Image (cartoon, rainbow, N blue to C red):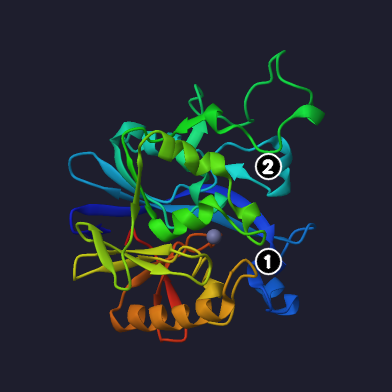
Amino acid sequence: MQIGEYKVETITTCRFGLDGGSMFGVVPKALWERRLPPDENNRIPMVTRVILLRRQNGSAVLIDTGMGAKWTQKERNMFAIEDLDLPAQLKNKGISKSDVTHVICTHLHFDHAGGLTTYKGKEHHIHGPKKTAATPKKTEEPKEPITEEVTPTFPNSVHLVSQKHWQWASAPTLKDRGSFRREDFLPIQKAGLLKTVDPGEKPMELLPNIFIEEVHGHTPGMMLIRIDDGNRGIVFGADLFPTRYHLKPNWNMAFDNEPILTLSEKTKILSQVFKNNRIIVLEHDPDIEAVRLTDESGAFREISLKS
Ligand SMILES: [Zn+2]
């Protein structure tokens, strides 16, 4: 789909699974398990789907990067991670890592920001850093990986993050500390590639035809991204609308920091999207790339950006 100067497409960078109860909060299991049947560990199937915006001159903008590849085998098993190698997929489309001029981060939870950094010296690392003789035994390993071992995946890119969210991610609370991995984003700052933005209360045009708007119920300063040329508009739902089932205003994640705020933000955005006939891209839906709403309550029909 063409919007303004961009050819807009999505890339599925990873398949993984999270606990269904965490993903649906107070919604009874009897209701959600019929829609997304969980595996033997109660995990529902999910993907990380990112947006690629290609310009005529070969350069590109990415919105989010998915889980990335900095996972140990134990973590891969825990989250049922199947990495689909974003850099390799970009390469297949004729885009090198240095062609990416901007990475816009909706927020820095690990399933959105994991691909921002890569183990140093590794083209693409599937099983974590190689153990050397000098590597301490397992029991002596530090709890958190050392950020010096990783490097920005897109070395020519400006990385755009909400100022409010950056502050939050840099000092997370006990509730959401497990959702942030500092090796995903501190090396970006260290390399001088970070640009924080503060859109304030209203949507802000970040780049031509790319607008950002903050919502705060999931995590403070999460950015919804809208690609819009006045004729066509796509909203990247991030964790406000992770799957098609989360289009219902009251089907929300237990991860949300302020559930009541999420509810009112969803109601407002659904109304805007419906009235303007915009498309919502679903970042985590295992089956559906995007939807158009058929009413303001979150009813939808499936669409493809290829059409
Ligand atoms: Zn999130």
Q: Position of residue 209 (x, y in %)?
A: 21, 61
Residues under labels 1 and 2: Cα distance?
Answer: 18 Å
Secondary element type, mark 1: helix
Q: Position of residue 33 (x, y in %)?
A: 71, 72
Q: Relative to residue 148, is residue 305 drawn left or right? A: left
Name the foreground residue: 293 vs 198. Answer: 198
Quarter that holds the N terminus = bottom left
Q: Is residue 239 above or below residue 163?
A: below
Q: Which residue of the protein is positioned furthest toward the top in this rendering? A: 133
How busy is the neighbourhood of tag 1: few (under 14 within 10 Å), some, or many (20 plus)? some
Secondary element type, mark 2: helix
Name the residue: 56% across, 37% down: 69
To which residue does mark 1 refer?
22
How busy is the neighbourhood of tag 2: few (under 14 within 10 Å), some, or many (20 plus)? some
Residue 298 visible in the displayed image: no
On whether ligand 1 comes within 8 Å of the CB at mark 2, the answer is no
Quarter that holds the C terminus = bottom left
To which residue does mark 2 refer?
76
Name the residue: 75% across, 78% down: 30
Amino acid under disc 1? Ser
Name the residue: 72% across, 44% down: 77
Name the foreground residue: 39 vs 119. Answer: 119
Work out whether mark 1 precedes mark 2 in sequence or the reverse, and give the earlier one: 1
Name the foreground residue: 145 vs 49. Answer: 145
Task: Count every numbered label the image shows and give the total.
Answer: 2
Q: Position of residue 104 (x, y in %)?
A: 36, 51
Q: Relative to residue 74, is residue 86 drawn left or right? A: left
